[in-house]
Amino acid sequence: MGIEPENSSREALARIERDVANLKDALGLLGAKPCSICGKFYLRSNPGDLLKAGGYYVCYGCFSSWWSDLCPKLPIRDREAIEHSLTRWLIDHHHAAVFREFSELPSRELQDVHIVVRCHECKGSGKQYGSERCRSCLGNGTVWVVTLKKQ
Ligand SMILES: [Zn+2]
Ligand SMILES: [Zn+2]
């Protein structure tokens, strides 16, 4: 008679694991990278698909929850470096807009990504040239980076 059912399912599992490992290798050779959060693969030739920051690769779909988890755990210095690159990524690839005033924000239902980052111009101090109020953040030291939901 054939193989024990238990054995065959274990073999099937081992085969699947081997197949998956081979596929991952192949995708890597093609220049694809998985999102560190959801594991979905993206081609690196599309820089808008995956953000590379702080040792993570994060897709747009995972971005908001990833950042709200990670952000409070980061030391200020690391946070600034990452904030700068993720702001650029959101602006360059996801049409993000930077807002200086709360009243200018689009209504909440229209917003997708909504994060608060330190102002890059004044490094969060809210001041410029010594004592002048920073024009980039209106003296708040932070700005909002917001993307709109895709229709
Ligand atoms: Zn993802
Ligand atoms: Zn500023």
Image (cartoon, helix red, strand yellow):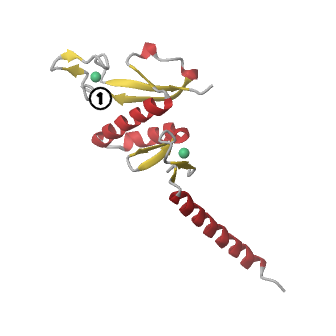
Image quadrant of residue 77?
A: top left
Q: Which residue is mark 1?
A: 120
Locate residue 68, reporting x and y percent: 45, 38
Q: Residue at x 78, y 77 (%)?
A: 5
> For mark 1, does the 10 Å Cα neighbourhood hold few (<14), some (14 to 19), or many (20 or more) residues?
some
Q: Residue at x 54, y 17 (%)?
A: 107
Q: Residue at x 22, y 20 (%)?
A: 127
Locate residue 26, reporting x and y percent: 56, 61
Image quadrant of residue 81?
A: top left
SS category of the residue bearing label 1: loop
Q: Amino acid at mark 1?
A: His
Q: Ligand 1 shows up in which quadrant of the image?
A: top right
Q: Residue at x 31, y 26 (%)?
A: 119
For this orientation, the residue located farthest to the left is 130
Locate residue 149, reporting x and y percent: 57, 27
Q: Is residue 27 above or below residue 127?
A: below
Position of the N terminus, as image quadrant, is: bottom right
For this orientation, the residue located farthest to the right is 1
Q: Is residue 1 above or below residue 54?
A: below
For this orientation, the residue located farthest to the top is 103
Side of 129 where 57 appears, left or right: right
Side of 41 where 82 appears, left or right: left
Q: Nearer the viewer, residue 61 or 50?
A: 50
Locate residue 142, reporting x and y percent: 34, 25
Q: Nearer the viewer, residue 27 or 21?
A: 27
Q: How many marks?
A: 1
Label 1 beta carbon less than 8 Å to ligand 2: yes
Side of 108 where 97 appears, left or right: left
Position of the C terminus, as image quadrant, is: top right
